[in-house]
Image: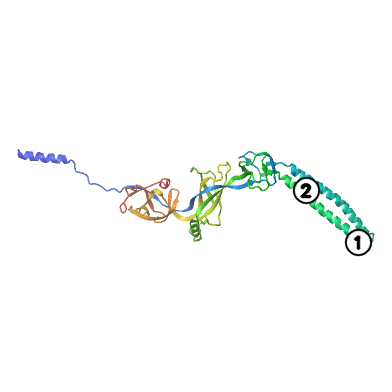
Amino acid sequence: MRKWMIVAMTVGVAACRGPAEAPATDKPPEVGVVTLAAQDVTLKAELAGRTVAYRSAEVRPQVSGIVLQRHFVEGSQVKAGQLLYQIDPASYQAALQQAEATLASARAALANLRSRAQRYAELAKIDGISRQDGEEADAEYRKGLAAERAGTAAVAAARVELARTRVLAPISGRIGRSSVSEGALVTAGQSAALATIQQLDPIYVDVTQSSQELLRLKRRQADGELAPSGTRALLRLEDGSPYAQAGRLRFAELNVDRLSGAVTLRAEFPNPDGLLLPGMYVRVELEQGVQRNAVLAPQQGVSHDEQGRATALVLLADKRVEQRVLTTQGTQGAYWLVTAGLGAGDRLIVDGLQRARPGETATPVALPAKQGRG
């Protein structure tokens, strides 16, 4: 009886243990990889700046008088040569008439002096008059010529003054508010402008860049590290939205600001709809040069260690995971521009980083280019 009890207990214990567990198999984790390729990369810099009118002209009177009428609507578009203000022309019209009368008198006197000088010249040939009388007649004629020329000049000056009572637009553009109304007295050369006209299409954008950064770019171009790029510029508005029209970099200022150590760059943008107004704060993306055979690494595949160094995990040919310390040179959109640590053909791990361990193996899963780079 005791023997059967021992056998039953043995069988029960075996039943409690259940079936024998299968030996565990260590399967390498799957990781998403992107194969890097060398390519020409246009380096870009995003700089802050403000918009500036393409042209700006302050309208001032060139003669004194009472403003009779304003011929424009504030804030409207005006054309070069368009009448803006009419200053009372009465006194200037009278001055012109007086100058014309003086000129007519001088011309009438000149006709008599000319005939007298010609008659005396003929008489002098036959000794009909004294030599002194002939010289005096010729001198009087020459004085008459000078008076006629002075009268002509006075008429021209009076016409200019009369024309200036019509204040015309010096340039085409959008005109601002008027500082005077009908009945106001204005004076020639006054310091206060009557109005300001600004040409806004195209429009300038002035941005600043560190002189050290500009010098570094020029040195890299001189050493052959960077190829010259185009002058294309892109604009981002105050609210962060992109501006639809692309612009061009026009020039860089020749002087460095002593206080900020920055150089002013000027770009030109089309502004057909008048969306951009002078003084707006914007950001401009400028092309700085082309780096040949550069490597762009997706940002999701690059991290930083405790020392602040950029690191990445690379899957080698034998499927071992290797950690690399990178040297980067800024970002280009969603990518790091890597100058050391990664090369063309490296398989960068961008997905499953938490499952990858340096020195261990992993199973690669190739990701589409757009997914790996997004």
Q: x, y (%) of residue 217?
A: 49, 57
* The quarter of the displayed image where residue 252 is located: bottom right
Residue 296, horizontal then vertical, whole percent: 43, 52
Drawn side of residue 89 relative to residue 23, left or right: right
Q: Measuring 86% from the left and 51% from the top, which residue is drawn there?
A: 109
Q: Position of residue 356 (x, y in %)?
A: 32, 49
Query: Mark 1 sits on what residue?
Result: 131
SS class of the residue under badge 2? helix
Q: Left of 123 or right of it: where is 196?
A: left
Q: Residues at badges 2 and 1 in contact (C-beta under 8 Å)? A: no
Rendered-image quadrant of the N terminus: top left
Q: Nearer the viewer, residue 266 or 84?
A: 84
Q: Please state which amino acid type lies under the numbered disc 2.
A: Val
Left or right: 57, with 21 as reference point: right
Tell me which numbered mark, 2 or 1, is placed earlier along the sequence: 1
- In the rendered structure, the answer to whether residue 192 lies left or right of residue 263 reads right
The residue to which callout 2 is attached is 155
Disc 1 residue crowd, few under 14, some 14–19, many 20+, Cα 10 Å: some
Q: Looking at the rendered structure, which numbered label has been put on residue 296?
A: none
Residue 96 seen by the camera = yes
Amino acid marked by disc 1: Arg
Q: CA distance from mark 2 to mark 1?
A: 37 Å
Q: How is the image coloured?
A: rainbow
